[in-house]
């Protein structure tokens, strides 16, 4: 099984440790992981801003980079969803179609494809789980509170296998953090207010760490936590699942 | 550039008072929580939503015939039917009905359509007094403001502010803010109005093609009080209010109020079919851009809307920016996909007033793909040239950088160039990111650098 | 003029015909209808009583509304206990304190009662009265709105309504206030063998 690692642009640049944790996790499962060096971005920043028509070149580049892998795995629900919904190629449409159906966000890849049922990791902290909207409502990584349907959560299913971890319940289980791509600067006031409220929910419920399957939400919340000089930290779910045993 | 403030600017003003934002957010979240409790108690909820969506889809696809059928039946029931292509024609029809009867005072129950048409201003300019009888609408009318929410028109007002308005207009004691006392005052005030007005205008929640009847839902009883005491009852409806058969009400009435307020049903679900003896009943069927929206394949589903307001209550942006920041009659997520159809330039900001979190689509009782339509409107708005030059230049720059691995991976001691093209990371003092947030500390190198060194054995 | 313009635009722009869902009547839930009706009616601010006879109803009402002066009923069989409504200008109902009417049936899932014009005497009566009393046959509670509309069928009524509880509003800061423009209270009586 050949797995291609897709590392979103901002993780590559700002949070290499998240990509390292993802790679190591996949390698620990005995997978042959490739990392195409020419990858850049899924094109979502342009598309969500109304410029999907400019994403032809990033689409072709993405298709070129990831054609031929059995699975493409990414530590981001949002970027994964964008590729799933919008990747197209005029040059090799069949390849693009393959990628759309073979790309997985990391936690769903672990639960649904790898059927992971135990994890050797330890994280002895109180952790609040932020459900990133695109992962949750887009990829259905977890049940949504709006629906009348049975509960499940792929990220929490994995986190519960980690030694010593204590998941804290939130008052609003799946409210958006307000990052929203360019929304975070175009609608600065509302974006920040949403972020502050989300962070406050975790703090109120005594979380020491906030985790998520999307680093963009965490980057936004981290920016707020740091400005508030809060001791609460953010950590990507890959880093917890890859945390060494103590 | 226009001088009209856009959603972001209006939202920023709203956010100057953070305590008030918290209050607004909590009040509407309370309504969302009631909606959850009500819907989670119905095992068939998701099936009901799907069924309602399918019924509405059938309506959209057979609208012409249903409208003709509805008109036939309504006429046979003794109701007068009028057609209005736009807001101006709707308002003119209302005025002509009143003039014919020599009526210069009218009582009105909730109708978002008349807000969309700005009927009150038009009638007042033509010497007709209009009094809104829904409590929330009466409050904003006295405050000379538009409603900020389609179901809860004065949800943005605190009871103390309402007390001040009542003190000024209805003579309550200064400082009185007890909702019980204020409501009783409005009851007495409006009872006198109901008893003295010869014309009443109501909205329409559902119009039934097979019977020609229409259903109006209220909790206060104001639509009925107005209509049953007036000589003339005018009902205004957008043509999308149609449903095919009476039995379909069983689906919609189960969904509407549970979605709206978490009640199992409104206090009154009134089925108006024929005028009472001696009364005139008029139905005005309004287009006002709806037939254009019907032709937009990506956006026609917005016409399924039954105006429950659930998407507003759940919207994290609406709750923290207030209805007025949408500067249109129907605010929130649904308003943001309806308004650009009416005026793409004026409302070009609204589809961007969202994080695309998708909660709106999940609570929608007729399963409108609201957040997908917001995404699609963004594309249409940009293609039609309603974006700024700065934004377009930035997006083109970003595309260039992200299309070239060489540029993207170029790194130097001064920092990685690609960071400049990631919109939330533009490294200058004008970047709104920094106003209330810190940037992540730049790591020593990118993941690509690490990978080359640790998996490819390259020297850094 | 506009009629043709609108209808033509619609004809041109409406999508390809999509069928109606096959069935909207298949939603049956296992609930104890009478118990659920009581529970929901009380939740929405109504009161539920049982009575052995119309005389019993009147007796209970007198205890409940000792101050009431003007009693109106639209039920000929109740005329010995309250004034039978007469055809007149509805404005004359302005000062009714208690109105007693009959309902067709109740709906368990939402506490609503179905009334039609022929049971009201005047359309305004159940709204203009200060207190509304609806008499229902004890065995007339259906579980869901689907069954309600099966009963309604193609009944031809100039006016009809579901009434669920007393009039109310929460427009001021979401504080629930009972008694907006319509009745300040709703009492439903369940009676054995109501004609």
Image (tube, coloured by chain):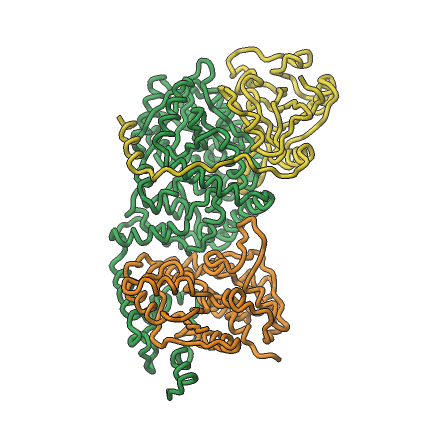
Residue B97 vs residue B282, the one in the foreground? B282
Location of residue B129 with respect to B308 vertically, above or below:
above
Q: Which color was chain B given?
A: green
Residue B152 seen in the current view: no
Point 56% across, 20% down: residue: C125
Q: Is residue C162 left or right of residue A188?
A: right
Q: Provide the letter of the chain coloured yellow.
A: C
Q: Is residue A112 above or below residue B86?
A: below
Q: Is residue A116 visible?
A: yes
Q: Answer with the quarter of the image where residue C145 lies.
A: top right
Looking at the image, residue A118 sits to the left or right of residue B140; the answer is right
Which shade is chain A? orange
**Which of the pair A237/C17 is nearer the observer?**
C17
| Occupied quadrant, residue C13 | top left
The correct choice, above or below, for B123 with respect to A9 in the image is: above
Measured along the vertical axis of the image, is residue C165 above or below residue C172? Answer: above
Q: Residue at x 36, y 29 (%)?
A: B65
């Amino acid at each position: 099984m050949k797995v291609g690692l897709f590392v979103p642009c901002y993780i590559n640049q700002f949070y290499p440790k998240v990509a390292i944790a993802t790679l190591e996790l996949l390698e620990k499962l005995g997978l042959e992981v490739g990392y195409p060096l020419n990858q850049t971005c899924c094109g979502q920043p342009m598309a969500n801003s109304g410029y999907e028509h400019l994403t032809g070149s990033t689409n072709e580049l993405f298709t070129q980079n990831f054609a031929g892998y059995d699975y493409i795995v990414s530590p981001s629900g949002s970027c994964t969803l964008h590729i799933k919904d919008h990747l197209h190629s005029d040059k090799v449409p069949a390849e693009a179609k393959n990628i759309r159906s073979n790309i997985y966000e990391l936690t769903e890849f672990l639960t649904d494809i790898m059927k992971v049922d135990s994890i050797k990791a330890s994280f002895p902290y109180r952790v609040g789980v932020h459900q990133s909207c695109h992962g949750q409502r887009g990829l259905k990584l977890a049940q949504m509170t709006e629906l009348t349907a049975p509960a499940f959560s792929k990220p929490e299913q994995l986190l519960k296998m980690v030694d010593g971890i204590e998941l804290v319940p939130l008052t609003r289980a799946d409210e958006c953090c307000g990052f929203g791509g360019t929304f975070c600067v175009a609608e600065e006031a509302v974006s920040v207010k949403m972020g502050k409220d989300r962070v406050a929910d975790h703090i109120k419920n005594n979380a020491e760490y906030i985790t998520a399957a999307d680093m963009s939400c965490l980057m936004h919340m981290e920016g707020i936590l740091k400005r508030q000089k809060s001791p609460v930290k953010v950590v990507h779910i890959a880093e917890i699942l890859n945390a060494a045993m103590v | 550039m226009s001088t009209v403030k856009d959603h972001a600017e209006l939202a920023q003003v709203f956010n100057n008072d953070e305590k008030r934002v918290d209050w607004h957010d909590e009040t509407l979240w309370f309504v969302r929580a009631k909606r959850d409790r009500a819907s989670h108690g119905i095992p068939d909820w998701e099936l009901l939503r799907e069924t309602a969506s399918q019924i509405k889809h059938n309506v959209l696809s057979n609208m012409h015939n249903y409208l003709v059928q509805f008109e036939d039946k309504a006429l046979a029931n003794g109701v007068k039917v009028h057609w209005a292509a736009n807001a101006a024609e709707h308002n003119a029809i209302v005025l002509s009905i009143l003039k014919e009867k020599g009526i210069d005072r009218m009582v009105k129950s909730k109708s978002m359509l008349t807000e969309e048409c700005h009927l009150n201003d038009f009638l007042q300019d033509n010497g007709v007094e209009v009094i809104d009888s829904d409590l929330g609408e009466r409050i904003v009318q006295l405050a000379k403001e538009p409603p900020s929410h389609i179901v809860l028109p004065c949800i943005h007002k605190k009871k103390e502010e309402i007390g001040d308005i009542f003190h000024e207009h209805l003579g309550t004691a200064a400082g009185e803010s007890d909702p019980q006392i204020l409501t009783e005052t409005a009851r007495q005030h409006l009872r006198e109005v109901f008893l003295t007005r010869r014309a009443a205008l109501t909205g329409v929640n559902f119009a039934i093609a097979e019977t020609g009847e229409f259903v109006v839902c209220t909790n206060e009883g104001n639509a009925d009080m107005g209509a049953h005491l007036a000589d003339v009852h005018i009902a205004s409806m957008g043509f999308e209010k149609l449903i095919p058969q009476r039995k379909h009400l069983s689906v919609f009435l189960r969904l509407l109020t549970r979605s709206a307020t978490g009640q199992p049903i409104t206090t009154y679900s009134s089925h108006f079919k024929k005028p009472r003896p001696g009364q005139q009943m008029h139905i005005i069927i309004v287009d006002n851009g709806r037939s254009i929206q019907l032709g937009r394949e990506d956006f026609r589903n917005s016409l399924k809307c039954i105006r429950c307001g659930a998407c507003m209550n759940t919207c994290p942006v609406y709750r923290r920016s207030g209805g007025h920041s949408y500067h249109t009659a129907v605010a929130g997520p649904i308003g943001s996909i309806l308004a650009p159809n009416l005026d793409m330039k004026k409302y070009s900001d609204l589809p961007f007033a969202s994080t695309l979190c998708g909660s709106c689509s999940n609570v929608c009782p007729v399963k409108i793909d609201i957040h997908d339509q917001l995404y699609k409107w963004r594309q249409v708005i940009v293609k039609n040239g309603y974006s700024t030059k700065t934004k377009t230049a930035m997006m083109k720059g970003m595309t260039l950088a992200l299309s070239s691995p060489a540029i993207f991976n170029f790194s130097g001691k001064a920092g990685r160039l690609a960071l400049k093209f990631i919109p939330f990371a533009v490294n200058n003092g004008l970047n709104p990111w920094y106003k209330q947030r810190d940037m992540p500390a730049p790591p020593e190198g990118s993941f690509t650098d690490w990978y080359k060194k640790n998996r490819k054995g390259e020297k850094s | 003029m506009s009629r043709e313009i609108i209808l033509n635009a619609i004809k041109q722009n409406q999508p390809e015909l999509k069928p109606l869902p096959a069935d909207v009547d298949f939603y049956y839930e296992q609930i104890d209808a009478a118990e659920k009706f009581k529970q929901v009616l009380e939740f929405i601010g109504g009161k539920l009583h049982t009575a052995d006879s119309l005389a019993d109803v009147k007796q209970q009402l007198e205890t409940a509304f000792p101050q009431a002066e003007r009693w109106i009923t639209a039920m000929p069989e109740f005329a010995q206990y309250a004034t039978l409504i007469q055809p007149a200008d509805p404005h004359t109902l302005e000062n009714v304190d208690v109105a007693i009417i009959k309902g067709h049936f109740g709906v368990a899932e939402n506490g609503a009662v179905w009334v039609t014009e022929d049971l009201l005497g005047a359309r305004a009566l159940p709204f203009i009265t200060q207190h509304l009393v609806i008499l229902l046959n004890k065995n007339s509670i259906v579980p869901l709105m689907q069954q309600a509309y099966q009963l309604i069928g193609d009944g031809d009524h100039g006016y009809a309504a579901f009434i669920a509880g007393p009039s109310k509003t929460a427009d001021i800061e979401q504080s629930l206030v009972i008694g907006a423009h319509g009745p300040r209270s709703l009492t439903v009586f369940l009676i054995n063998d109501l004609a």
